[in-house]
Amino acid sequence: MNWSETKKLKIAELTSEESRRFLTDEAVVLVPLGSLEDQGTHAPMGDYLGAECVALDIARGAREFGIATFVSPSIPFGGSDYFGSTHGGIAMSQSTLVALLDDIFKCLTRHGIKKIMLINGHGGNVTAITEVTHRWRQTTGVFVPSMYLWQISYELLKDILGPEGAAKSSGHGGDPLTSIGLHYYPEILRMDLREKPSTSGMVRGVNVGGINAISYKGAKIQAPVEALEAAPHGIWGGDPVFSSAETGQKLSARLVEIGAGLIRDHVSKGFEAA
């Protein structure tokens, strides 16, 4: 029984015998992670849903290159940051996320699975990811890349929509996540509940400069601003009225091209030394 004989992409759906046969040292494992926070009044709070959908499509794309690629269960709770004000949101401390990633890597590598890639959908995860992946490289030689999907998407949207079009839709609560949602799971979005993006506000007598910043003399200053103070409706910058399933489809296709290509050219080879 060879991995190519199964249509299963999710490790959670493999039987234990399939796991032993398919998850060899040649296999690539993608780990999606995101958050449960305010994504706008119209969008589901779990941005990990989008990360998992993209990860599954990346796995499909990598399999077309003949690479055994599987997807682990998603990490739904992000590292805590300025979204603690989200009603119903759940986040982990950075130390907890570090420990969780460490344990995931230990479990996989114990069985010789060292070709790992993170598919990240939350900015609050970046600090923990950086700490853990650097330590694992330094102490074990395991080299784990991370695709921060939405950061990559902001640049891709400029090409897909043009700079002016991207500027209209790009931002928290707008694109890329709203278009990604409209592409993958439109039935759980509530576009009838969408609001206009926040463009101003005050906190402690200073102008808000963003979801985690104040503005002073034209400079954006990082500050402990709560998301609810900056964007009461969870939307800052981009207007979701300009989001679309078509944009989401084009964007996901580009993300899959990048992810599957990276797996083919580097991850599957263990990032061989030049």
Image (tube, grey):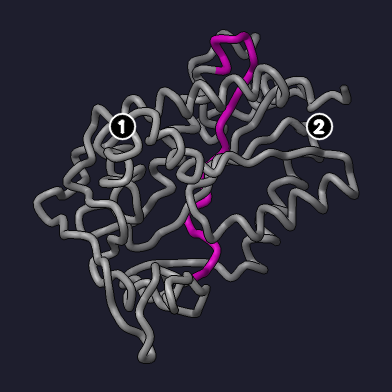
Q: Is residue 178 left or right of residue 143?
A: left
State which quarter of the image contains the C terminus.
top right
Tell me how far mark 1 sits from mark 2, CA to CA.
43 Å
> 145 and 112: which one is in front?
145
Q: Which mark is residue 16?
A: none
Could you tell me which secondary element the residue under label 1 belongs to? helix
Q: Find residue 254 and report its image quarter.
A: top left
Q: Which mark is residue 161?
A: 1
> Which stretch appears magenta?
62-81
Q: Position of residue 93 (x, y in %)?
A: 58, 70
> Height in image: 114 above or below 63?
below
Q: Is residue 87 left or right of residue 190?
A: right
Which residue is pictured at 33% across the width and 37% down the height?
A: 180
Magenta-span inclusion, residue 77: yes
Q: Earlier in the sequence, mark 1 or mark 2?
A: 2
Q: Which mark is residue 112?
A: 2
User: Which amino acid type is marked by label 1?
Assistant: Leu
User: Which amino acid type is marked by label 2?
Assistant: Gly
> Height in image: 57 above or below 234?
above
